[in-house]
Image: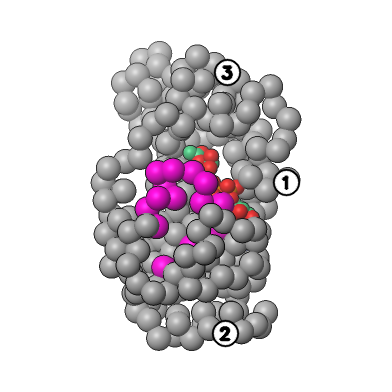
């Protein structure tokens, strides 16, 4: 892929050693994981309840069975691999150019690609714990199998993800603000920037190289110094 925008991004990346990436579900669609808000995304499929409801704290508490049906059928996609966006971001970190990946994704694909400093704003599907006693649990029990997974203590095992109605982790949020505030280049990609407080974190950026790589428009397009409406994996394969 080559365009004036991608060339500009490549030049900026070549010249910087303080890049921060902020991403969402669109980073993993090229790995085969559907996003939430595209026409073929999770939120446009027919479920008995809207996914935002199913993915909420109160729903999980009241209907763990229905939650787990959705979790295993929709959130878990077997055999996924990092794509060129994840891989290039990991390389940039290794080259000393990228300081942090801040992600809203819960799929663990940045770490699978080799990224070390990954701030998971919404947690991870690869971790589980008991909602009653807090003990760490085997994520396979949660992601595979049937029915509601339970701890030895009888409590319901839950994913270590941030459900709707739950706050973000303070420590992770503080770190994300730190990296964004001090970034030379902030690259935002594959996110509709519709979900707060995560989306609001990008307001801490103070530089003049705000890059947006997203297939569709976002509420932040007008603040961007560079906009690329292309597939993010293809863009990162070229920079
Ligand atoms: P969305 O589904 O809201 O947005 C994904 C964005 O990525 C859309 O704007 C797409 O146009 C774009 N996109 C899709 N594939 C792309 C590709 N290959 N290249 C570039 N852009 C692409 O997902 P998020 O913004 O991540 O939260 O959603 C934020 C949060 O909403 C999620 O973390 C999740 C959800 O509810 C929780 O579950 C708490």
Q: Residue 65 carries which label?
A: 3
Q: Residue placed at 35% from the left, 72% from the top?
A: 207
Estimate the spatial distance between the alpha carbons at disc 2 and disc 1, rounded to whole Å. 30 Å
State yes or no: residue 88 in magenta. no
Sequence-wise, the earlier of marks 2 and 1 is 2
Sequence-wise, the earlier of marks 2 and 3 is 2
Q: Residue placed at 32% from the left, 55% from the top?
A: 176
State yes or no: residue 198 in magenta. yes
Q: Residue placed at 42% from the left, 36% from the top?
A: 162
Q: What stretch is highlighted in magenta?
A: 186-202
| Residue 210 percent coordinates (x, y) | 44, 69
Answer above or below: position of 12 versus 164.
below
Helix, strand, or loop for circle 1?
loop
Q: Which mark is residue 151?
A: none
| Residue 10 percent coordinates (x, y) | 52, 82
Answer above or below: position of 207 versus 104.
below
Helix, strand, or loop for circle 3?
helix
Q: Can residue 30 be seen in this view?
A: yes
Q: Name the residue under label 2.
A: 7
Q: Name the residue under label 1.
A: 39
Q: Nearer the viewer, mark 1 or mark 3?
A: 1
The quarter of the rendered structure image containing the N terminus is bottom right
Q: Can residue 110 be seen in this view?
A: no
Q: Do the residues labelled 2 and 3 touch (CB within 8 Å)?
A: no
| Residue 73 percent coordinates (x, y) | 66, 33
Q: Which quadrant would residue 36 be assigned to in this image?
A: top right
């Amino acid at each position: 892929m080559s365009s004036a925008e991608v060339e500009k991004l490549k030049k900026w990346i070549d010249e910087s050693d303080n890049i921060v990436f902020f991403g969402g579900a669109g980073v993993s669609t090229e790995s085969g994981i559907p996003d939430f808000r595209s026409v073929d995304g999770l939120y446009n499929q027919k479920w008995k309840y809207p996914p935002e409801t199913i993915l909420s704290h109160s729903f999980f508490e009241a209907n763990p069975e229905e939650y787990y049906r959705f979790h295993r059928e929709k959130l878990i996609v077997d055999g996924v691999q990092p794509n060129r966006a994840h891989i290039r971001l990991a390389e940039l970190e290794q080259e000393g150019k990228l300081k942090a990946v801040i992600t809203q994704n819960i799929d663990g694909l940045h770490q699978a690609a080799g990224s070390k400093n990954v701030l998971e704003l919404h947690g991870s599907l690869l971790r589980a714990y008991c909602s009653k006693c807090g003990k760490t649990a085997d994520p396979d029990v949660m992601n595979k199998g049937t029915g509601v997974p339970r701890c030895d203590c009888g409590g319901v095992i839950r994913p270590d993800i941030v459900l709707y109605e739950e706050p973000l982790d303070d420590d992770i949020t503080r770190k994300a603000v730190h990296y964004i505030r001090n970034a030379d280049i902030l690259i935002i990609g594959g996110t509709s920037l519709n979900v707060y407080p995560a989306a609001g974190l990008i307001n801490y950026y103070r530089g003049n190289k705000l890059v947006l790589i997203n297939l569709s428009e976002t509420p932040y397009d007008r603040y961007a110094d560079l906009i690329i409406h292309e597939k993010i994996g293809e863009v990162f394969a070229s920079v």
